[in-house]
Image (cartoon, rainbow, N blue to C red):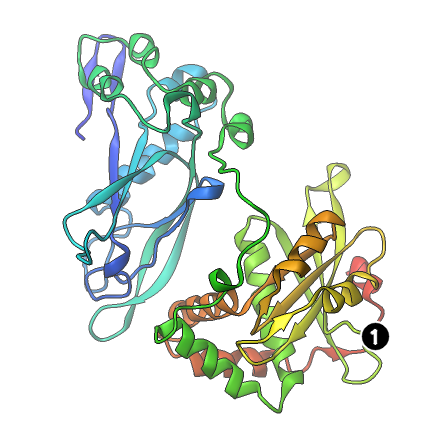
Amino acid sequence: MAKVTTSDGTRRPAILIRSSPWKAGTEQTPWHDVFDMDNGHVRYFGDHKAGLSATPGTTTGNAALLDAFTGHQGHTLEERAIAAPLLLFRAVSQNGKPKGHVEFCGVGIVERTERLVQWGGREHTTFVNYVYDIALIDLTSEGDAVTWDWIEARRDKGTSHAQALELAPRAWREWVKHGSSALPRLRRRVAQAQVTKVRDQRPQLGGSGAADLELVYRYFDGRKHDFEAVAAAVAARLLRGAGHGYVEGWLTRRSGDGGADFVGRLDLGTGLAGTSLVVLGQAKCVRPDTLITAEQIARVVARLRRGWIGVYVTTGAYSEPAQTEMVEDQYPIILINGMSLVAELRSMARDDHGGDLAACIERVLSSRASVVTNRRPEEILLQ
């Protein structure tokens, strides 16, 4: 929407964002947006494309979002009051048809931006683009909806910033009042069961995810120790993607690893307001239809000391009893199943290897060949 000038300043009523997952990876839409509705997070790629001569950041979408980011980083109530809300939509299928239908996903605030290099275009050339991490705010008080009267008020030149703000969702008003420090408690969260059914941990049969998982399993069948390098890389990427500071350590030797396959460090906060946790990783390359049991997870947990957490990475899935025991006993362990594993590997392949999954795996293996050792896990805290 175009900016309007009111008696107390200029504001943009809103920015409407639409993502089409079915177009992801095409020449027209080479990026892959992520909508994590349950945790109130969207990772949205800007509209720069391969072959464009325009300077990155000057295309219509990127220019508007970068301008919105400036407003969302406002240090005063007055600055945040004129910031443009993001209204996010994504295309959904209806009756098997992917086009023509969208669903409202929520109201967003840009938390951070990143300038990056992507693959795209018919020739798979590289180009510079922007990606935005967007927080979706809680709309529980409004029945998970937004009244259009708020946007109309922001469009009305005769309505002041304060008057328009009165029609905003409760969480938006709280954010305007308190700023970014309030986002953790204002973020959209969906209460959900902590146990995931086995069928929801496996890619759809006949789909690309199932083919990728089978490729990974066959690649490492008979060379399970090499799988540890890939498991460590995927764990590192997932932890960093969640906004944590993660330091990769080393892979353990085949003998004497004591049940640990890789070691890392999770850094929380900084200085006196920070701490570091030892990450002990277990990697299991098994047939994709294999279930990891509670006993297998418990063996990893038994090695954890205070201030340590575990990561279990597998090409299989986790049984529901195993997950139930983990929740009830409050095990400090992260579970990465086969579907999550190949989804992350496929993302790595798209970002750095033109979509070539095998080349991505080879690169991971070659880059980690020299970091195998039998050091004690706690030594990672000294790095």
- Which residue is the extreme one toward the left? 100
Residue at left offset 84%, top offset 80%: 256
Q: In this view, does 109 lie above or below 303?
A: above
Callout 1 secondary element: loop
Q: Nearer the viewer, residue 183 or 79?
A: 183
Residue 261, image x, y percentages: 72, 74
Q: Mark 1 points at which residue?
A: 258
Total numbered labels: 1
Residue 150 appears in which quarter of the rendering? top left
Residue at left offset 30%, top offset 8%: 163
Q: Is residue 318 left or right of residue 96?
A: right
The amino acid at mark 1 is: Gly
- Which residue is the extreme one toward the bottom? 222
Q: In this view, does 331 lie above or below 199?
A: above
Q: Which of 20 and 114 is in front in this view?
A: 20
Q: Which of 261 and 143 is in front in this view?
A: 143
Residue 224, image x, y percentages: 64, 85
Residue at left offset 47%, top offset 60%: 200
Instruction: Using a 10 Å C-alpha cutoff, classify the residue at mark 1 as few (fewer than 14 neighbours), some (14 to 19) or many (20 or more).
Output: few
Residue 319, image x, y percentages: 62, 64
Residue 309 appears in which quarter of the rendering? bottom right
Q: Is residue 375 left or right of residue 199?
A: right
